[in-house]
């Protein structure tokens, strides 16, 4: 049986790094690659490119994984930049939106992690809190965790009958490294998990026409220490 080829959206380190003589670096966290391999898939990192190349990239993979990273440019959801907005990469935003659109067109499943979940929402017409300080009910430490990412820091509640609920159950302890979050959820998506302060932690497509799963935390940094996190990758690689 052939292993599914998983296209992983790559990031670009554009700041000067001495080890690479100041040259930009295309990368993805090793945990993402390792989790896909552990689940039985073949990881293939897709570098940031011209949006018109998305059709070709999606045609050679079986599924798409959208990774974490920078903030999303707020003009993509009709807002001016807030003073607490972090670094953005518009080139990455536009390319990954094209990957999403092409994956939907070619009926390829999508698993979206952290920024990836937020971008999926924006690509389908939703909006974001540019910083969680703009969310009036904010009371959970979601960003700047002093704890190593292999350790979970807060709980989430999961819709029992959702895709996420069938994979990992009704509750889960997760790690958390984000200062943005979903504000207005796309009409094409449904929320399936929430933190105790109401921040959306999981999403899926509202109909059976597209296979999508999104989580706000980072299972790729915990799969070696949590059977629930590994189960997410197993489901994505082998069942989604």
Image: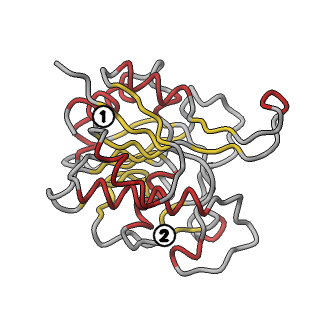
From the top left corner, tell me how far across and down residue 69 is, in percent. Answer: 60, 48
From the top left corner, tell me how far across and down residue 153 is, in percent. Answer: 57, 36
Give the secondary structure at mark 2.
loop
How far apart are the two marked residues, 1 and 2, measured between alpha carbons?
A: 25 Å
| Position above or below: 183 against 28 | below
Q: Residue at x 54, y 32 (%)?
A: 152
Q: Earlier in the sequence, mark 1 or mark 2?
A: 1
| Position above or below: 208 against 13 | below
From the top left corner, tell me how far across and down residue 226 is, in percent. Answer: 43, 23
Dot 2 crowding, Cα within 10 Å, few <14, some 14–19, many 20+: some
Q: Residue at x 26, y 42 (%)?
A: 165
Q: Residue at x 64, y 45 (%)?
A: 12
- Colouring method of the image: secondary structure
The quadrant of the picture occupied by the N terminus is top left
From the top left corner, tell me how far across and down residue 5 is, in percent. Answer: 31, 31
Give the secondary structure at mark 1.
helix
Q: Is residue 183 left or right of residue 111?
A: right
| Residue pointed to by mark 1 | 168
| Residue pointed to by mark 2 | 183
The quadrant of the picture occupied by the C terminus is top left
- Residue 200's tag is none
């Amino acid at each position: 049986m052939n292993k599914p080829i998983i296209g992983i959206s790559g990031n670009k380190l554009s700041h000067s790094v001495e080890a690479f003589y100041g040259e930009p670096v295309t990368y993805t966290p090793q945990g993402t690659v390792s989790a896909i391999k552990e689940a039985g898939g073949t990881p293939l990192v897709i570098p940031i490119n011209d949006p018109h190349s998305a059709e070709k990239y999606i045609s050679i993979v079986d599924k798409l994984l959208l990774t974490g990273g920078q903030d999303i440019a707020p003009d993509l959801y009709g807002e001016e930049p807030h003073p607490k907005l972090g670094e953005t990469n518009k080139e990455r935003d536009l390319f990954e939106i094209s990957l999403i659109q092409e994956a939907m067109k070619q009926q390829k499943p999508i698993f979206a992690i952290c920024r990836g979940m937020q971008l999926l929402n924006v690509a389908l017409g939703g909006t974001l809190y540019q910083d969680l300080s703009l969310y009036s009910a904010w009371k959970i430490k979601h960003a700047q965790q002093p704890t190593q990412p292999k350790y979970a820091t807060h709980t989430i509640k999961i819709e029992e009958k959702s895709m996420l609920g069938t994979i990992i159950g009704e509750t889960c302890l997760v790690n958390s490294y984000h200062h943005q979050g979903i504000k207005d959820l796309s009409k094409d998506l449904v929320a399936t998990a929430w933190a105790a302060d109401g921040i959306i932690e999981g999403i899926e497509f509202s109909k059976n026409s597209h296979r999508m799963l999104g989580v706000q935390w980072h299972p790729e940094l915990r799969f070696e220490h949590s059977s629930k996190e590994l189960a997410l990758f197993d489901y994505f690689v082998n069942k989604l």
